[in-house]
Amino acid sequence: MNTNTDGSSPSRVSTLAPKEGGGFPNPGLPPHSPRQADISEPAEKRAERLVAFLFLLSVAGTVVFIAAYFLVTPLDTNIFAEEGTPRALWWSNLVTGLGLAIAVFFIGAAAVHWAKTLMPDQEWVEERHDIRGSDETRKIAAEMITGGLAETGIGRRPVMVTAMVAALAALPIAVLAPLSTLGPLPGNKLHHTFWGHNPGQRLARDHDGTPIKLSDVAMNSIFHVMPEGLTHETPHHLEERAKAAAVIVRIDPRLGQNEESMSMGVQGVLAFSKICTHVGCPVALYEQQTHHMLCPCHQSTFDVTDGAKVIFGPAHRPLPQLPIEVDAEGYLVAPGDFTEPIGPSFWNIHKDK
Ligand code: FES
């Protein structure tokens, strides 16, 4: 029977009993219970024969594979089907595959049975040697270090050491210098879009710029929209388009779970930024049955009925919503900007705009 490292006898019972003075005693290893093959010679012989039989089955599988490789080929000899036909290929794959599977499987089965019935199954603990070096070794190491330092003469050359420290401290500054040429800081540009620069604009179809009436938006439909006033003549129009891109969807108002979000829409028509809050891909897929919007890049999923909250994926913020109204002629208009900065989050996203 094994003995614990503290000299006590192995026992499972002791694991729950706290040791005097705190902590738990070493639980040790459970006592070894002999198997049939350990105590009975006939059982041992039986196990041995079974292991040998399993290995022989593996040999048989290998023979099947080799025979099939030459006798059940897809294009030449095939004892089951006409050569060169799909049937011949099917037979070839089947028989060679089965042969190989049998060969591999029975090697594994034999090894497992061998290990479980005949291999020694007692566990042994090998104590780890002390990691700390002996006092003598430590003394020698300390002498080597101090001796090495003395040989370098560092202690006698303070000017050189000071210069070295200065050089090492200055080098990182050279790495920082290129940062000064990265261009102007973005200021509050990331907080505003073209919708906010020109309040009251109509929502226009992205592809042809025509404004959208409330009555155009059928239930469960989706439109990709831009501010009507954003044209090719607009300065930096590509950047402005990238920030202003939005989608509108219409849901049954009774499905709305988020009062604040529903109040920013009109009769179930809601507008959200199209720019994913993860890393900025266009969120362009709308699932009509579940009212989920999906970003195709990393599968962030936003629930339109609940203020476009994230219900799956790596995005952390809901899609910013664009409050909308209807003007006197029935067109959808945006009285202001998105409720939050659009796109991926950045370090001062909620700083005063
Ligand atoms: Fe949308 Fe990553 S950019 S999930």
Image: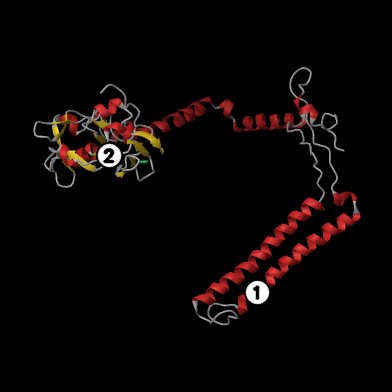
Q: Residues within 10 Å of mark 2 (few under 14, many from 20)?
A: many
Query: Residue 87, position in %: x, y?
Result: 52, 76
Query: Residue 326, position in %: x, y?
Result: 15, 31
In the depicted view, which residue is nearer to us: 322 or 188?
322
Image quadrant of residue 259? top left
Q: Is residue 78 visible?
A: yes
Q: Residues within 10 Å of mark 1 (few under 14, many from 20)?
A: some
- Residue at position x 77%, y 23% in the image: 17
Which image quarter is the N terminus in? Answer: top right
At numbered mark 2, what does the secondary structure look like: helix, strand or loop?
A: loop
Mark 1 CB lies closer than 8 A to ligand 1: no
Query: Residue 159, position in %: x, y?
Result: 50, 26
Q: Is residue 180 above or below residue 94?
A: above
Under mark 1, the amino acid is Ile
Query: Residue 164, position in %: x, y?
Result: 49, 30
Q: Name the residue beneath numbered marker 2.
A: 274
Horizontal side, residue 97 vs residue 176: left or right: right
Q: Name the residue beneath numbered marker 1.
A: 66
Under mark 2, the amino acid is Lys
- Residue at position x 75%, y 64% in the image: 55
Q: Is residue 203 visible?
A: no
At numbered mark 1, what does the secondary structure look like: helix, strand or loop?
A: helix
- Residue at position x 57%, y 74% in the image: 92
